[in-house]
Amino acid sequence: MVTIGHAAEGRPTHLALTWDGRQLAAYLDGRPAAQQRTTDNPTWRRARNLFMGAGPDDSDHWMGRMEGVAIWGGALNPEQITAEHTRYRSLMADRNPVSRATILARRVEATPVPNPARIDPYRRALAGDVFEVVRVLEGRLEAKRIVVAHWMIMDGTKIPWPEGDTVTLTIERFEDHPQLESELLHTENEDLLLPMFFAVQPPQPAR
């Protein structure tokens, strides 16, 4: 095991790992972070599956998001890793900012949470619940009634809902999260004209 360092909350971190047959090296944001000499083939050479964000026994869950995952066919040198970090940082800088709002909202239509075993082979699922907006706490939101997709099952476990139906939500437009298109989504909503959002953080008790 190689201890690499820490990822700052709320800030993207570029991570690179490379092995040249003698040394395993890690880089954070294009800079050397850790290294370990080893002549043993890395675990992924023998493993049938590659796990990211959790251990193979479904433990050590990492609560965060990943994108731009790439697996190379050979070892990268420091200059190549720095160049990849610079390239991806430029891609992120060219993105249009995503609109975000924090609201106080009352859930008026709730999606029943299924037994996690019934959604197999999926390990996670979203619920599309209907909310009435009580007050906008931060940002801008014109709609008064919305659908919010939030995680109800993660890693085969039901996510507890805060006490009461009035909660604090931090939301972004669902269409700004194309990575969710392949996720399992359950909803009882039949009003297709309601604007849809994604809760980028778990619902919190009302404040």
Image: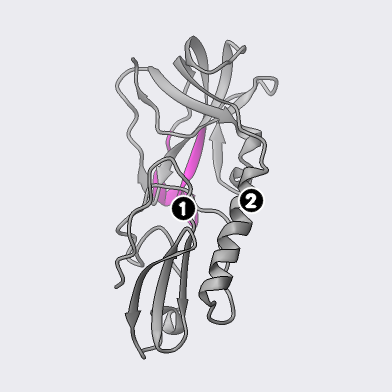
Mark 2: which amino acid? Ser
User: Dot 2 lies on which element?
Assistant: helix
Tag 1: residue type? Thr
Magenta residue check for 31: no
Q: Is residue 174 above or below residue 165?
A: below
State the image coordinates of residue 157 (x, y, percent, origin top left): 35, 46
Q: Nearer the viewer, residue 153 or 20?
A: 20
Task: Identify the residue at image location x=65%, y=50%.
Answer: 91
Instruction: Give the residue drawn at x 62%, y 12%.
Output: 142
From the viewer's side, name the closer residue of 150 and 12.
12
Binning the other alpha carbons within 10 Å of mark 2 as few (below 14), some (14 to 19) or many (20 upward) gives few
- Across and down, in percent, residue 135 comes to 47, 9
205 vs 27, left or right, is: left
Q: Are marks 2 and 1 in contact (CB under 8 Å)?
A: no
Residue under numbered circle 2 = 90
Q: Which residues are magenta?
A: 113-127
Q: Which residue is mark 1?
A: 13
Res. 49 visible in picture:
no
From the image, state whether disc 2 or disc 1 is nearer to you: 2
